[in-house]
């Protein structure tokens, strides 16, 4: 039952993205960004990552002001990382004001992820 609830929540989030999520998705969608395939609102454990590249184990979180100094976000990052994902967090303001800078950080992480030795 919890999985179904999480799936429904992910669907709702996909249907109501923030402006920052829309901006970032316009660059990440359809495997157009560095050839990496991202998905939106991807369930990882009991959480939903805003974006995830499953093959490279990258998760991207877009944070608004409500996330400032949040212990819940620290825990969320720790748990998503426990599933083997490298979590990148960006402020919505940075995504909107410095899109190219954010994309460069993501591109750098994609390059690093492709060069990592896979775990056995």
Image (tube, rainbow, N blue to C red):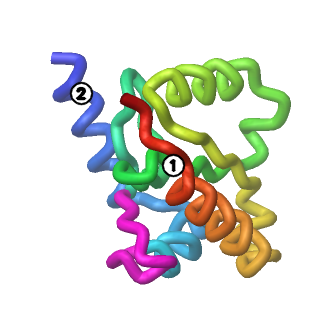
Left or right? Give the position of 86 relative to 3: right
Q: Main secondary structure of the magenta part?
A: loop
Nearer to us of marks 1 and 2 is 1
**Count of picture labels:** 2
**In the image, is residue 19 above or below residue 70?**
below
Q: Which residues are magenta?
A: 29-39
Left or right? Give the position of 107 relative to 5: right
How far apart marks 1 and 2 lie (CA) works out to: 24 Å
Q: Tell me the tag on residue 41.
A: none
Count residues near mark 2 (Cα–Cα under 10 Å), then give few for <14, some for 14-19, many for 20+.
Answer: few
Residue 13 makes an appearance in the image: no
Residue 64 spot, x, y in % from top left? 71, 49
Q: What's the residue at 34%, 36% (across, down)?
A: 43
- Say if the magenta span includes residue 57: no
Residue at disc 2, secondary structure = helix
Residue at disc 1, secondary structure = strand
Residue 90 makes an appearance in the image: yes
Disc 1 and disc 2 in contact, CB within 8 angstroms:
no
Q: What's the residue at 24%, 27% (across, down)?
A: 5
**In the image, is residue 80 above or below residue 89?**
above
Which residue corresponds to mark 2? 5
* Rendering quarter of residue 65: top right
Q: Tell me the tag on residue 58.
A: 1
Residue 36 spot, x, y in % from top left? 42, 69
Q: What's the residue at 59%, 65% (across, down)?
A: 111
Looking at this view, is 83 or 72 the one in front? 83
Residue 88 spot, x, y in % from top left? 65, 48
Image quarter (top left, top right, bottom left or bottom right) of the C terminus: top left
Labels 1 and 2: the sequence-earlier one: 2
């Amino acid at each position: 039952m919890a999985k179904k609830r999480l799936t429904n929540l992910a669907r709702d989030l996909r249907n109501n993205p923030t402006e920052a999520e829309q901006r970032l998705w316009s660059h990440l969608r359809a495997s157009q960004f560095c050839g990496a395939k991202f998905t939106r609102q991807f369930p990882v454990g009991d959480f939903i990552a805003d974006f995830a590249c499953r093959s490279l184990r990258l998760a991207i979180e877009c944070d608004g002001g409500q996330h400032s100094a949040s212990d819940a976000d620290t825990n969320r990052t720790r748990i998503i990382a426990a599933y083997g994902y490298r979590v990148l967090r960006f402020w919505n303001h940075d995504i909107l004001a410095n899109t190219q800078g954010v994309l460069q950080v993501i591109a750098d992480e994609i390059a690093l992820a492709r060069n990592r030795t896979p775990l056995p």
